[in-house]
């Protein structure tokens, strides 16, 4: 899918040349035709990348549709850079992901009350969870793995966490955790590993159960590294659409979200 990167608004020379060879003159972005499966980030994220593209020119817009013209001659000497970020973080409850060892258990300390669990001296050494094979756009990210170990004194490895692509064949970032990396036994702790993506990349998060201590995994959380999380305030129009984005010079970023009266929203 050579044009798949357009879901994130990422057009590089390769995509531009392909658009030209296909005789594509215009690209439309339609916010109402932008379900979550298109991108983990809102339509606005894609719009900003398209608007910043040297290969496109915004020629018309009438909410919820934007029309971009594919330019004949891109601005010379400007590089393809994709610097959009989002305040949105994405959480994966890992007990819902596939696994190769351990079980899924109730755990009142865990988010949603459930966790993935590997029992020392019982369960095989293998992956406690893996997946979800979701594509993320170009950017610098932090990924937090929320884990709990039954032993915080052992120097043996209790878990290996990693971020990979290509069905696990290419590890992009990883960290081995010993019992002593946990500040206390039987208490959840966040372990952060960074990952830099130079192009849209299909990601997999994994935790390997080493068998040397009981191990629980609660969730994985991925967010752009430049975001303060939780942020002190959110620009509502950067979140998933619940209304209409309009220019508003009085708003903090020059745009504001307008929500019609009587409209009902569903989250989740
Ligand atoms: Ca959980």
Image: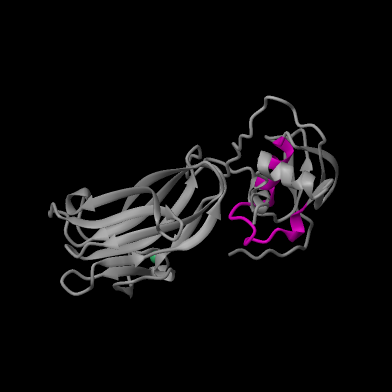
Q: Position of residue 215 (x, y in %)?
A: 25, 64
The quarter of the displayed image where residue 15 is located: top right
> In this rendering, would 263 be left or right of 90?
right
Residue reaching furthest to the top: 77
> In this rendering, would 81 be left or right of 63?
left
The quarter of the displayed image where residue 217 is located: bottom left
Q: Position of residue 3 (x, y in %)?
A: 68, 52
Q: Is residue 237 visible?
A: no
239 relative to 53, above or below: below
80 relative to 14, above or below: above
Nearest to the observer: residue 202 or residue 246: 202
Disc count in the image? Answer: 0
* Magenta stretch encompasses residue 111: no
Q: Is residue 157 visible?
A: yes
| Colouring method of the image | one colour
Q: Position of residue 152 (x, y in %)?
A: 17, 55
Q: Position of residue 74 (x, y in %)?
A: 76, 32
159 relative to 125, above or below: above
Q: Quadrant of the C terminus?
A: bottom right
Nearest to the observer: residue 32 or residue 38: 38
The quarter of the displayed image where residue 71 is located: top right
Q: Quadrant of ligand 1?
A: bottom left
* Magenta stretch encompasses residue 35: yes
Residue lying at 64% horizontally and 34% vertically, measured from the top left: 80
Residue lying at 37% horizontally and 59% vertically, measured from the top left: 206
127 relative to 243, above or below: below
Span colored in magenta: 29-53
């Amino acid at each position: 899918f050579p044009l798949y990167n357009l879901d994130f608004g990422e057009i590089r020379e390769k995509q531009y040349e392909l658009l030209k060879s296909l005789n594509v003159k215009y690209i439309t972005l339609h916010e109402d035709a932008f379900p979550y499966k298109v991108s983990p980030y809102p339509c606005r994220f894609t719009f900003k990348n398209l608007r910043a593209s040297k290969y496109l020119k915004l020629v018309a817009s009438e909410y919820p549709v934007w029309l971009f013209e594919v330019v004949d001659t891109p601005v010379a000497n400007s590089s393809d850079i994709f610097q959009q970020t989002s305040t949105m973080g994405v959480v994966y409850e890992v007990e819902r992901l596939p696994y190769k060892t351990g079980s899924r258990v109730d755990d009142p300390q865990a988010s949603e009350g459930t966790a993935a669990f590997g029992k020392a001296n019982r369960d095989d050494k293998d992956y406690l969870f893996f997946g979800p094979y979701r594509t993320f756009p170009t950017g610098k990210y932090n990924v937090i793995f929320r884990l709990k170990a039954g032993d915080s004194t052992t120097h043996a490895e209790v878990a290996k966490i990693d971020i990979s692509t290509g069905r696990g064949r290419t590890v992009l970032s990883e960290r081995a955790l010993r019992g002593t990396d946990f500040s206390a036994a039987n208490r959840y702790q966040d372990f952060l590993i960074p990952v830099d993506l130079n192009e849209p990349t299909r990601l997999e998060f994994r935790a390997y159960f080493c068998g040397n201590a009981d191990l629980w995994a609660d969730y994985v959380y991925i967010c752009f590294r430049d975001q303060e999380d939780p942020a002190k305030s959110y620009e509502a129009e950067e979140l998933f659409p619940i209304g209409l984005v309009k220019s508003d010079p009085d708003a903090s970023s020059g745009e504001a979200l307008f929500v019609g009266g009587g409209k009902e929203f569903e989250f989740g």
